[in-house]
Image: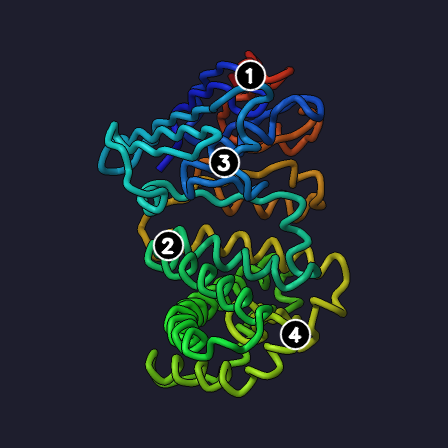
Amino acid sequence: MYLKEIDLKNFRNYKEQSVSFHEKVNIITGNNAQGKTNLLESLYIMSLGKSFRTGRDSEMIGFGEDFCRARSKTVKDDGEIDIEIIISREGKSVKIDGVRAKKTADLLEHVYMVVFSPEDLKIVKDEPEKRRKFLDRELCQLKPVYFKNLGRYKKILLNRNVLLRQGEANRDLFSVYDEELADYGARIVAERRRFVEKLAQISRELHEKITDGKETLSVSYECDLPEAGDLSALKQQFMDRLQKNFRRDLYRGTTGTGPHRDDLKLEIDGVDIRHYGSQGQQRTAALSLKLAEIYLIRQETGEDAILLLDDVLSELDTQRQTFLLNRLSEVQIFITAAELSDPLFSNLPDSFIFRVEKGEVFRMDLGENS
């Protein structure tokens, strides 16, 4: 799979822009605040229908404009797929091969993207919410039903928390919310557990290779619900916890149990690196987790994901840079960088090099790299 071209209108600082890409390596250079990350963002929304930078779609609309449009063509083993996304102040519409999608979730399973930015290097030491988002983002791509379950869970959770802040007058409504919250929550926890088992194995193998076997990375899912034999038992455990903690939740005005409170536990040689790891260990673990995403997508779907490296190479030492790029020789890569002085670029295979200036993209002619 590779993204062949993108056509933008009023997207961030791009008025009108069309770009055709190399099927393997695309290097995007330019000074800060010119639009490099904006370009990657426009590619990423072709996968999940939303940004990796903001939860507000309207922020992608150019200043002073009423709408923005991004249209792409992606080449897959079974042919090409055209995706068009239009975002206006009123909402968002999606077309797949010219047919309007009923919902954004219809995009899932068409184009697989993995983004890796300097923020992702902090995933290990940052708050649990970042690690939950890491899990959810990947599972939403792989399992459209997870995307649906997660959305419903969040909506019910919001309603229950509103009710908690109003007091306990309507106990019947609490019973309804608890039943639904436990149902969708159990499904989310079950999928996360299955996913983390696979993630743990792949990331451990990658981490051992990055560190030449000197360290062993352990990844596990931290959940306050005990392991259950089946989905029904897990749901019942969740409901029991909700009822047991009702008074506490009522006092605090928020729901304290559920997958919205879970975390990923990350250890190196038995030491919890979320709190006690060195910066080097935390970054290596983050790199292992992000690389594992690529391998998991291939394992689960048979497709190669497209990798977006947003100014991340400058944050890694030479050893980790080399390992990252050598491991991904078979996938399409987009790399943003301020300049081309890094000797690493001279070792990359045939590629396209672009320069971004004030929301315009120029293809550079650099001999063999052009």
Task: Say which residue label 1 marks.
Answer: 361
- The residue shown at (34%, 78%) is 231
First in sequence: mark 1 vs mark 4: 4
Residue 304 to residue 18: above or below: below
Secondary structure, mark 3, is strand
Is 364 situated left or right of 30 in this image?
Answer: left
Q: CA distance from mark 1 to mark 3?
A: 17 Å
Could you tell me how far apart the alpha carbons at marks 1 and 2 are, in whole angstroms? Answer: 32 Å
Residue labelled with disc 2: 142
Q: Earlier in the sequence, mark 1 or mark 2?
A: 2
| Residue 96 seen anywhere in this rendered image of the structure | yes
Q: Tell me the crowding category of disc 4: few under 14, some 14 to 19, or many 20 or more residues within 10 angstroms, Cα based.
A: few
Q: Nearer the viewer, mark 3 or mark 4?
A: 4
Measured in 3D between alpha carbons, the distance from the residue under mark 3 to the one under mark 4, in whole angstroms, is: 46 Å
Q: Give the image location of residue 144, x and y in percent.
A: 34, 54
Circle 1: residue type:
Val
Marking on residue 343: none
Element type where label 4 sits in the image: helix
Residue 274 place in picture, x, y as percent = 70, 67
Tell me the amino acid under the disc marked 4.
Arg
Q: Which mark is residue 252?
A: 4
Report the residue marked by disc 3.
333
Check whether the beta carbons of the residues at disc 2 and disc 4 lie within 8 A of each other.
no
Q: Residue 90, percent across and down?
A: 44, 32
Disc 1 or disc 3, which is closer to the eye? 1
Q: CA distance from mark 3 to mark 2?
A: 20 Å
Name the residue rendered at 71%, 26% in the picture.
Answer: 32
Q: Amino acid at mark 3?
A: Ile
Q: Quadrant of residue 194?
A: bottom left
